[in-house]
Image (tube, rainbow, N blue to C red):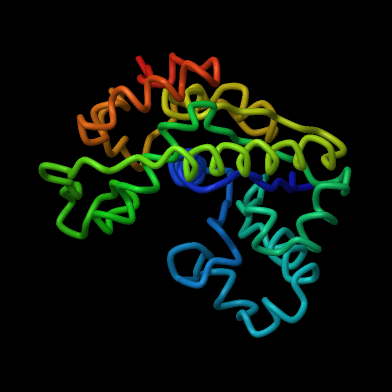
Amino acid sequence: MPVKFVVFSQARSGTSLLVETLNNHHDIYCHGEIFHDVTEWHIRREYIAEFGLLDRQSSQIEFCYSVLSFTNGRAAVGFKMWLDQAPDAGAVLLRDKNVKKIILTRENRLAQFSSGELARETGVWNLTARKDGKLQRVDNPPTIGFCKPVFRKFVEYQDNFFRTYENAARGEILRLKYVDVARLEFGKIYDFLEVEPVTPEPAKQKLYSSDILSRFHPSHKDEILGVLAAMGKPEWVVEKID
């Protein structure tokens, strides 16, 4: 019986690295965000060739289970999604004890926030190999601004989102942190998905420096430090991976 799983998370939390590294395993078949507008980046072409995407929005629950039913000969099949992309389908999947859940969070909200802002600023969302085999680069990335109310609202939204996952999820759950994925600590992931442990082959690389404070314009330094101190999160100025 194939293992069925869903990665529940939010943007800029390491899900692309997780999914593409899982797809380098010979017995795992994993899609990206199956409700993303750009389907060719997220839904595996073998599934599209077999079933198409005509009912993706009108029958979201059925679509999710259709994706999970197509294993392409692998022992584990899954995809990633954010609950707000398809709330009804997400709620059903979270309650389904026959579907394993991977909840991946990036605990450093300042890193997650700045990653999203930089991606929007540069237009580069992931560091991936091009057809010539070379990696994309973000040369001299810009520094970004900081708005305290916007950041606090972002943190509150993320906290509420992951609280919903925790409260709603039933069945087998694997809770992952961004640093687990970035460090390629995949042993417990392979165990959870009931596949042979292998040395993980990463498909992406970290875009920006682990010095999170350096991502912002220097004029915001004191304000950011003050906000983090008030939140009890002064450690968010860096995100150590090594």
Q: Is residue 167 above or below residue 122?
A: above
In the image, 142 versus 37, the foreground residue is 142
Q: Residue at x 45, y 43 (%)?
A: 12
Residue 151: percent from the left, percent from the top?
47, 40
Q: Is residue 150 above or below residue 83?
A: above
Q: Residue at x 32, y 27 (%)?
A: 212
Q: Quadrant of residue 120?
A: bottom left
Q: Residue at x 58, y 33 (%)?
A: 105
Q: Quadrant of residue 130?
A: bottom left
In the image, 40 versus 206, the foreground residue is 206
In the image, 192 versus 17, the foreground residue is 17
In what quadrant of the picture does the C terminus appear? top left
Q: Residue at x 50, y 22 (%)?
A: 185
Q: Is residue 167 left or right of residue 202?
A: right
Residue 84: percent from the left, percent from the top?
67, 58
Q: Is residue 208 above or below residue 211?
A: below
Residue 179: percent from the left, percent from the top?
47, 24
Q: Is residue 33 left or right of residue 214?
A: right
Count of number-bearing discs? 0
Q: Is residue 18 left or right of residue 53?
A: left
Q: Is residue 12 above or below residue 49?
A: above
